[in-house]
Amino acid sequence: MRKTLAVLTALVMVLAIATVAAAEAAPFAFHNGVQFGMSMDQIQAVETGRYEYDNEHTHGPVDFAELEYEHTKVDGIRAEVKYLFVGNGLVAIRVNYETRDISYRQLKDNLTAKYGPAGAVDKALLANGIYAVDDDGRLERQSEAIVAGNVMIVLELDEDDIDVTYVDLTAAYVK
């Protein structure tokens, strides 16, 4: 009986570890199933509404191609979404919310409930990804980050809006 119990306990532990590993290995998915690495054509196929194409020039080592959707909703909240590409692969997503639509605290609570606790922005981990957050490579006075697997989610409060940037930490330009 003890042998059977020990074998069953070991089996349960292995299955629990495998389940946790599978959950951690699942790729990050933004709304509408958008995932890092997708091409512009793939984004346009799943995102609705009119968009603008632009080259965002930064003061850093990389320029981004950008698809901007001004009138969309993310998790039911009105927002402007910018998809940032290096080459033709999605490497970051910047979402701009107006403070009249949601407070910084509400947004932070929503994101921490989904992805984990927020803390100080680890600029060393973010590296060149800082230029996806801000083209000057600076953070606003109130900024925090959540690291969820290979994604850093940076929250910034400006005077009248909240920027949330999802950065793929595995993207080549980040290093």
Image: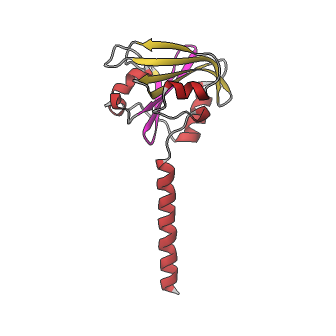
Residue 72, image x, y percentages: 64, 21
Magenta stretch in the rendered image: 143-168
Does the rendering let one see residue 142? yes
143 or 52: which is nearer to us? 52
Does the rendering let one see residue 155? no
Residue 95, image x, y percentages: 55, 23
Most common secondary structure along the magenta stretch: strand
Which residue occupies 31% across, 19% down?
Answer: 61
Where the C terminus falls, by quadrant? top left
Which residue occupies 65% across, 19% down?
Answer: 49
| Residue 53 drawn in magenta | no
Residue 121 versus residue 117 in the image, above or below: above
| Residue 166 drawn in magenta | yes
Residue 5 versus residue 102 in the image, above or below: below
Which residue occupies 34% across, 25% down?
Answer: 128
65 or 104: which is nearer to us? 65
